[in-house]
Amino acid sequence: MTKEETTDAKRTMAMAIDRKSLARAAVILGGLAAGYFLVVALHRAEILINDYYLQILIWVGINVIMGVSLNLINGFTGQFSLGHAGFMAIGAYVAASMTKLMGMPFALALLAGGIAAAAGGLVVGIPTLRLAGDYLAIATLGFGEIIRVIILNLDVVGGPRGLPGIPAHTTFLWVYAIAAATVVVVRNLIWSRQGRALVAIREDETAAETMGVDTTRNKIMAFVVGAFFAGVAGGLYAHKITFIDPSQFDFMKSVEALVIIVLGGLGSITGTVMAAFVVTFLPEVLRAFADYRMIIYSLMLILMMLYRPRGLMGTAEFSFRQLGLADRRPVPDKGGQAVGRSDGPPPVLETRRVCMDFGGLRAVSDFNMTLRQGELVGLIGPNGAGKTTVFNMLTGLAEATSGRVYFMGEDITKRRPSEINDMGVARTFQNIRLFSNLSVLDNVRIAFRGERPYSMAEALLRAGRYSPQEDQIYRKSMEFLRLFGLEDRASEIASKLPYGAQRRLEMARALATRPKLLLLDEPAAGMNPQETQELLELIRWIHERFDLTVLLIEHDMNLVMKLCQRIIVLDYGLTIADGSPAEIVKNRRVIEAYLGEEAV
Amino acid sequence: MLLDVQNLHVHYGAIHALKGISFNVDRGEIVTLIGANGAGKSTVLRTISGLIRPTDGSMSYWAPRAGGSADASGAARQVNPCSLPAHKLVDLGISQVPEGRRIFPNLTVMDNLELGAYLRRDKAEMKRDFEMVFELFPRLKERRAQAAGTLSGGEQQMLAMGRGLMSRPDLLLLDEPSMGLAPLLVKEIFQVIVRINQSGTAILLVEQNASMALAVAQRAYVLETGSIALEGSAAELAKDPRVQAAYLGSA
């Protein structure tokens, strides 16, 4: 195909996809409208839904917004937050003040509430998201309390007396429309480049960084989007209940949202929506039991968690695929692609007197190495010699105590792993760090990046460059999987693959970031001679095909000797030899420290 | 006989991982299982140690001790490992050194070893076993106060094996002990395996390094996609052309 034909084909395909996505949007909107009118009609006719149930449905809607937005933070991104009520409070107070005190329109007030909460999310997120796990939970818990105490002391909004007389603007239509919008927006976000980055952070933060995901930025993004919707939910809440005071937004409110997402399934929007129904309706249904209501409610929650420990839905989702309305991406065509570029044989990587100390221990000492374009170099040495530490310093996972690392002439000593990956360094890990609960395809897709990636707005609206790029990412990812003999397993969960296939997938994922330099940490570990032979051919082939410079750590001398043009030997952090395989096997020091007498 | 496995089936959901395999381990023997990745070797070990429940088949284990503290009477008691949870089997003398080491990274080397002896109350004997582990792996003694996560890969493997020995097993299940080790260390680890065996412990060894495994084992089974394809004495199998082609890289 000529270039022109290719662009033409691309354009036609993009148009076809656009038409398809328009059709899908119409179906979704139509379905949502039908749902709304069904409820309204049932209510009018007094079938199933009376006034009382309609009220409860409004609370369900508010809980859906709270749950889905919290699930984005806790379930999808894996950042345990306990401060969701704080964002809700900001939204509630800002929106209520605007309508009640300033007489602004409701829509504007809701939006302002959301934005104020999002700003709150940004302010809290920047310092706290460096924390992880329990620490983050405590920090967000503290944040929620601070918000409450600030409001308690804010006389303009009534302080502890609360803010009465808020206009009752919140109708079923408002809640329904906003809840639906929340679901659609969060779903669109999850099924995009940005969403995959979030899930990657949940699965393995270190691996995500080395795939080029800026984890801090993405975590803050999730936090801000989640806070925005919690703020909007707060606005709806205030204009429903018409009287707010700080005690309504205490820790228990955050726990309520947490119960919804844990019950529904951390990482499932469908489950969250279902759980919002259960959690809102159950106490109402149990009213007949009067005093025992809350005990029964709690017992039922415990029982549900015992029988569905991963929540109602786990991480599964309802999807159009199940209804046959599949959003089918075209089957990838056969054919090559041009990846990699060559610009003469300058040094790709250079380290100058790099040292690494752990406590008092010098793990790597004055390490000097130059890798030239296209070289295939082995790094060997006894266990504990500092080989993996060298890899960590080259990829930004560890910062050298002293010395400098240059990649393509640029100093990367203090760069973040994601930046270094962006510049063209990719790696695999000794103990395989796949995103183990994600599909094989998604593992590669996370790593994949286009030239000018689509923006978050495009992702949320499914507009602009979203569809053509997603389509391209899908095709390219499948191509990578085919190269590594994994295309038949694209939809399998990564951790279920046999060991050898997991190693291959990790290499495919690293290559999908389009590196110039590939670092392989013990690729043959756990492989038998036959598999090792296949691996050898695979590495040789990708080295050539992608025009790569390769540095590998390996103990399988058979592989190293056959594959590498040059070998560097480390022992106790010191370089004890550097030369061709033939020189290395004869080297006295290497034999003593590493190979043993009768080896090779 | 120490362990006798008959017609063992294991399913992972729809996947039929072990398709009716039968084998046995005698007292004081080293038996090795070799086979490609995904053949089901680790599954066999995990089933024996009680981490996975088989869907069919039977296992008999003649516990040389009655459980609890070591019993010198030598009266064997037959139990079915399938009917007991994994931690009870440790008490009966089955100890597994898992693939990928699975040490406790934030605890010290000493803590890791002590956890290996979690079920034991015989302080004096335990002390002797610590010395035995340190004698087998002098590197661990140097690093006993260090967090296990800061050890190198090879040292972690030594620690995992040392931890496995601390329960004083009669049957030691080793899952790829040479994985990720430097050539010199691989030799060392295999020497240690032989020494452990000489002290009376039976070993069921899963290895990718088939040539080394066959060199130390008395008997061997070749596993292919969930079934036993070949079995025999290790020396015979090492000469078998089929084994040489597939697992020894036809050296």
Image (cartoon, rainbow, N blue to C red):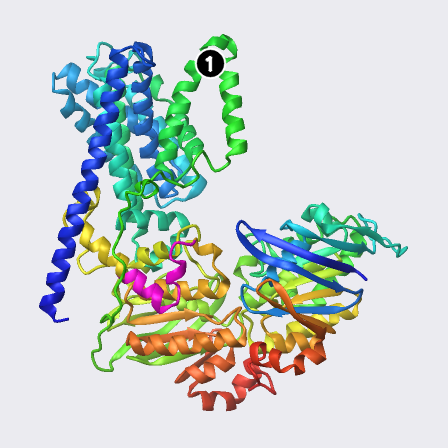
Q: Is residue A335 part of the magenta span, yes or no?
A: no
Q: Could you tell me residue A526's position as x and y percent?
A: 53, 68
Q: Could you tell me residue B13's position as x and y percent?
A: 53, 49
Q: Could you tell me residue A455's position as x and y percent?
A: 18, 49
Say if residue A102 shows up in the picture.
yes
- Chain ID, mark 1: A
A81 lies above or below A360: above
Residue in front for this viewpoint, A34 or A260: A34
Task: Determine the residue located farthest toward the front in the rendered image.
Answer: A324
On the image, which quarter does residue A448 sit in?
Answer: bottom left
Q: Which residue is drawn at 10% across and 62% down?
A: A8
Task: Determine the residue located farthest toward the left in the rendered image.
Answer: A4
Q: Is residue A490 part of the magenta span, yes or no?
A: yes
Q: Main SS of the magenta segment?
A: helix
Quarter of the image that includes the N terminus of chain A: bottom left
A237 lies above or below A522: above
Question: Is residue A106 rendered to the left or right of residue B247?
Answer: left
Residue in front for this viewpoint, A191 or B105: A191
Q: What element carries label 1?
A: helix
Task: Give amino acid for label 1.
Answer: Leu
| Magenta-drawn segment | A476-492
Q: How many labels does the image show?
A: 1
Q: Residue at x 50, y 10 (%)?
A: A289
Q: Which residue is drawn at 69% across and 57% down?
A: B7
Residue at label 1?
A286
Q: How many neighbours does mark 1 have within 10 angstroms: few (below 14), some (14-19), or many (20 or more)?
A: some
Q: Could you tell me residue B145's position as x and y percent?
A: 61, 57
